Image: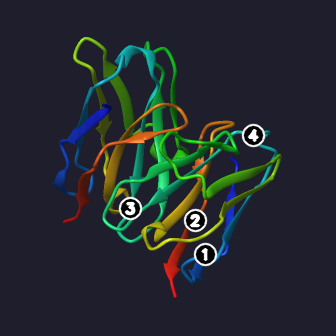
Amino acid sequence: EVQLVESGGGLVQPGGSLRLSCAASGFTFNSYWMTWVRQAPGKGLEWVANIKGDGSEKKYVDSVKGRFTISRDNAKNSVYLQMNSLRAEDTGVYYCARGEWDLDWGQGTLVNVSA
Amino acid sequence: DIVMTQSPLSLPVTPGEPASISCRSSQSLVKYLDWYLQKPGQSPQVLIRLGSNRASGVPDRFSGSGSGTDFTLKISRVEAEDVGVYYCMQTLQAPYSFGQGTRLGIK
């Protein structure tokens, strides 16, 4: 059974940083792209970033380029999202998902950017 | 960037009746489109991948069709457990993108 457990969310001031983690189990981690998707309160889904199984390719939505960095540690079966220069509009639930498409989703972690 | 447009945004349906949701893209996706359902209080779950392939465990009352820029999700007979928000997602090119979502409710 695929399991994805996100952590690292919380309250942070504008301009601050957070590092989200996603611990994966139940599948061969290094064989899969991993994806981060976010959802602002009461809003729809927004694709944020993804990373290839060996870490050689990374893609980002324009609104986070230069501020967010996706990475992975295949020895730890984990994917990360380093978020710097956070803004109020980055507030929301951040989901980790297995795959580049046909996504399997975790339960999400809440990020609140507020003064 | 590819823009995804869903319609309708709200869809009240009587149980047992069919339902249909449209998803259009600003450029051809070939077949690189998935459908997801986010039930109240839950994470999204995949229903249809690559336009028309039902995901494992998804009831056969759900079907996907289309290619290019026009795709459709159909539910042959809506059940109470189908309530939630339905999203299409394109995976042809990054940045990947979702439609605005269609909220299906029961009349």
Q: Which label sits in the foreground, 2 or 3?
A: 2
Please tell me which residue is depicted at 29% across the width and 25% down the height of the picture: A26
**In the rendered image, which residue does mark 4 sit on?**
B31
2 and 1 marks in contact (CB < 8 Å) = yes
In this view, the residue in front, A24 or A115, is: A24
**In the rendered image, which residue does mark 3 sit on?**
A89
Which amino acid does the dot numbered 1 rest on? Leu
Which amino acid does the dot numbered 3 rest on? Glu
Chain of the residue where label 3 is placed in the rendered structure: A
The colour style of the image is rainbow
- Secondary structure found at label 3: helix
Please tell me which residue is depicted at 60% across the width and 52% down the height of the picture: B60
Q: Which label sits in the foreground, 3 or 4?
A: 4
Residue B23 lies in quadrant: bottom right
Task: Please state if A30 lies on the left or on the right of A46 as rendered.
Answer: left
**In the rendered image, which residue does mark 2 sit on?**
B100
Which amino acid does the dot numbered 2 rest on? Gln
Q: Is residue A65 in sight in this rendering?
A: no
Q: Do labels 3 and 4 share a chain?
A: no
The first of marks 4 and 2 along the sequence is 4
Gap in angstroms between the C-alphas marked 1 and 3: 23 Å
Q: Where is residue A97 in the image (x, y as percent from the top left)?
A: 39, 38
Q: Which label sits in the foreground, 4 or 2?
A: 4
Q: Where is residue B8 in the image (x, y as percent from the top left)?
A: 66, 75
Q: Are marks 2 and 3 on the same chain?
A: no
Please tell me which residue is depicted at 52% across the width and 32% down the height of the picture: A100
Please tell me which residue is depicted at 75% across the width and 40% down the height of the picture: B31
